[in-house]
Image: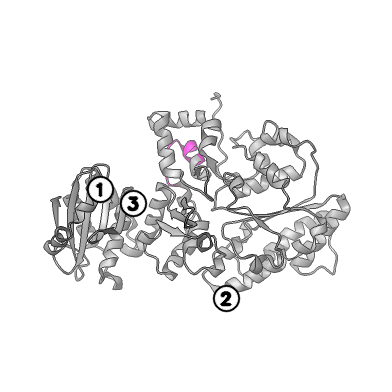
Amino acid sequence: MEDLQRLYPIGIQTFSKIREGNYLYIDKTEYVYRMTHSASGYMFLSRPRRFGKSLLTSTLHSYFSGRKELFRGLAMEKLEKEWVEYPVLHFDMSTAKHADKEQLLQELNLKLFGYEQIYGRLDEEVNPNQRLMGLIKRAYEQTGKKVVVLIDEYDAPLLDVAHEPKILDVLRNIMRNFYSPLKACDPYLRYVFLTGITKFSQLSIFSELNNLENISMDEPYAAICGISEDEIHSQMKEDVDELAKKLEVTSEGALMKLKENYDGYHFTYPSPDMYNPFSLLTAMEKGKIGSYWFGSGTPTYLIKMLDKYGVEPSEIGRKMAAVEDFDAPTERMTSILPLLYQSGYITIKDFDKELDLYALDIPNKEVRIGLMKSLLPHYVGSKAPETTTMVAYLSRDIRNGDMDAALHRLQTFLSTIPQCDNTKYEGHYQQIFYIIFSLLGYYVDVEVRTPRGRVDMVLRTKTTLYVMELKLDKDADMAMEQIDLKNYPERFALCGLPIVKVAVNFDSERCTIGGWKILNA
């Protein structure tokens, strides 16, 4: 690595700024060439937030603006023989988040006004769709070149109101009106590209734009956003070595930590392993592993939708589903799956060709822990500092193999939580345990099937597998009898770890653990 400190483009989404500022750029220009030379001139790409969609859109902007000098040393330099400058209309809709009807119209007015200063406007053009159509036609006439339209985060104005049908309808109609000229202006258009997080149906947003090709799950574009394992090895080897020094581990150890925390995304199958670029680059810059992507945005709409669909924390991952069930238009959702998938909280892990079903799960440790931290306040009130401290100490108890101390700590903690309506059923405590044990970074599962019934909870650490039976207003002896009667440990005999039986009784009056029993299997 050079003596000069490596610059990482954290939060920089402008291609020209990255290239002119000598920031690290993972070369995606081969994909840009493929996109712009395919049969389709209208494309849509869905990826989670902070996954590089805006940078990709900016790269397209620079390419269509004929800025050859920015692509020196990249794949595009060898691929493109004819550099043509086209008029580009680039709309970033992320500035229209949290907007009501009037604010959204004002945002569109501002965006259109900027280009009207270049290409002019007719008095007759009043509504956003009329003004966009006028812009496209005049840009074509004045330059003699077909027009490129780039719309980044097209769904940003709609995301926050996805759970409010009446407001969603109003804002969706405004956006549909704005996008409507794209089909009618086809003779004047060279290329149209839209990005977003969610997949609102073509009918509801893009009106008659039925020639829009959705490349989100196309295998040739699987690695178009994010950073692949190959790209880390080929373009970031020195960065990994530098991080390893700061973490005081080997380069292989640093790679393992990066993989555990930020890898695991797949947007089709088969697909290379994709890393979250925001988290990966932030870890490189700060020299430590942290929860960067999840910490960069509170998923309030996600929490509301989980409530709406009655989804428990333990139900978020490990699902088998047909593609139409999770890559469905957001406003036609019959389950939380499409929102979880499109937002990046679950991803594709495997594919069963025979059944045509995808295995979906939480991508990595960062997302799992971030999700559970967001959900925990809903179960234990807003005792954030106390909760964080308790989880830290609990982690040490479990790491030391001291389940007795861990349950003592949980008993004390739960007894400080204000009583609430939903503490009168066993499932409430099961979910609290699931969230807290997930925060420790261990494998945890609920309602695990065995030949003779279901185990309430299984917790697997590096040294021990805990088989746990939970009861409400009974006693720990009764819970232990059930474990023995149904011989739950037998199901896990081949796991290669010592098995410990844990029986726990919850006291609904005191809203905490009443008693417990721990025995080796």
Q: Is residue 507 above or below residue 148?
A: below
In-image side of 509 versus 275 (left or right): left
| Closer to the camera in the image, 144 or 104 | 144
In-image side of 255 versus 226 (left or right): left
Residue that carries the numbered disc 1 in the rendered image: 393
Residue that carries the numbered disc 3 in the rendered image: 439
- Sequence-wise, the earlier of marks 1 and 3 is 1
Q: In x, y percent, where is residue 470?
A: 21, 62
In-image side of 302 versus 434 (left or right): right
In-image side of 417 versus 192 (left or right): left
Q: Residue 166 carries which label?
A: 2
Q: Which residue lies furthest to the left in this view?
A: 477
Evaluate whether residue 48 shows in this view.
yes
Residue stretch in magenta = 281-291
* Residue at image location 22% in from the left, 57% down from the top: 468
> SS class of the residue under badge 3?
helix
* Residue at image location 37% in from the left, 30% down from the top: 249
- Sequence-wise, the earlier of marks 2 and 1 is 2
